[in-house]
Amino acid sequence: MRAKIGFPATLTYYSYFPFWKAFFEELGMQVVTSNPTSKSTLDAGVRETVTDACVPIKLFHGHVMSIRDRVDFLFIPRMVSVGDKSTFCPKFLGLPEMIRYTLDRLPPLIDIRVDLMKGRGELFRVCQAIGKTLNTGWSTATRAYHKAIRKHRLYQKLLLDRYLPYQAMARLFGEDEPAPASSHHDLNLAVLGYPYQVHDNYINVNLLGILDKLGANVWTTEMVPPKLLRRHIKCLPKRLFWHYSNQVVWAAHHYLEQDFVDGIIHVTAFGCGPDAMVDKIMELDSRQRGRVPFMSLTIDEHTGQAGMLTRLEAFVDMIRLRRDTA
Ligand code: SF4
């Protein structure tokens, strides 16, 4: 029987799961993910995590709890950097310890450090180190690495083609043939934030679905080609320290320059340190340019659909009114 490795379906899941799934499967393992977030996942995480942690970290605990008894290993890498001169937020850096010292009944953790700032070839070295831990041979790990790289590129391409992460994964893994996010509405809104907030339909109370019903096409950070994102590196005198925060700020700059964008929504987590700065930067930038309305949506464990719907309706109505009276 194949050994099972667990991958909690949150945090870096939306960015890198296809890579790791392809890698571990080629090593001969069965990859088990947690189910999409539900009330019980969130409640479990909130119960076990320190109160001042941000919602996404609480949620991560809940996801781990939901799979810990079903797997032989848990994959919780220490994500330091993906090589773009910024690091992940400190909570990502300490995630393996946070899980290890908070939760009991855990299978062995694979908590390899992923720090691609160390130079070219570092990801290959990381994959070889995992292979060694799992007693696979050098050539098997090499083959798995190349397969994972190919899968990751396909995933990136689908995201650029306007597939949302869950749609792109369904397409990649042959589960169904979803269509990309709709683009036939008359309104275009950039919905920016960390992928584990924007694409978790439970925690954001189906934000993207509501916007679709309100007649808005959604544009996310993942839909901006990396080359275009990098053109905005100099939009601030200094880069922010954190990887996902930079991506969001650069994407906001990108969309602010696009004439077709009617508004920007920043999805932020209650208790997020980096977002205190990111949100202000985005607000000031959009105010400076004047043309594009900006709204910030803070999500916490008590966010309800009624409140969210009211705010979104008001935002969309205001944009339409402004446009029709211009
Ligand atoms: S960036 Fe913010 S929301 Fe994400 S893990 Fe760090 S503190 Fe939490």
Image (cartoon, rainbow, N blue to C red):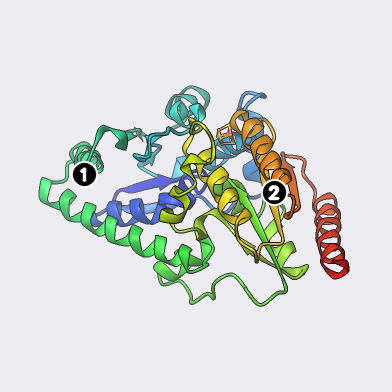
Dot 1 corresponds to which residue? 124
Q: Is residue 52 above or below residue 74?
A: above
Mark 2 vs mark 1: which is more N-terminal? 1
Measured as percent of width and height from the top left, residue 149 is found at: 28, 56
| Residue type highlighted by circle 1 | Phe
Q: Is residue 298 above or below residue 156?
A: above
Measured as percent of width and height from the top left, residue 279 is found at: 67, 38
Is label 1 in a helix, a strand or a loop?
A: helix
**In the visual, does 313 lie left or right of 192?**
right
Does residue 35 appear anywhere in the picture? yes
| Residue type highlighted by circle 2 | Arg
Dot 2 corresponds to which residue? 289
**In the visual, does 186 lie left or right of 235?**
right
Measured as percent of width and height from the top left, residue 90 is found at: 49, 26
Residue at position x 42%, y 34% in the image: 86
Q: In which quadrant is the N terminus drawn?
A: bottom left
The image quadrant that residue 18 belongs to is bottom left
The image quadrant that residue 288 belongs to is top right
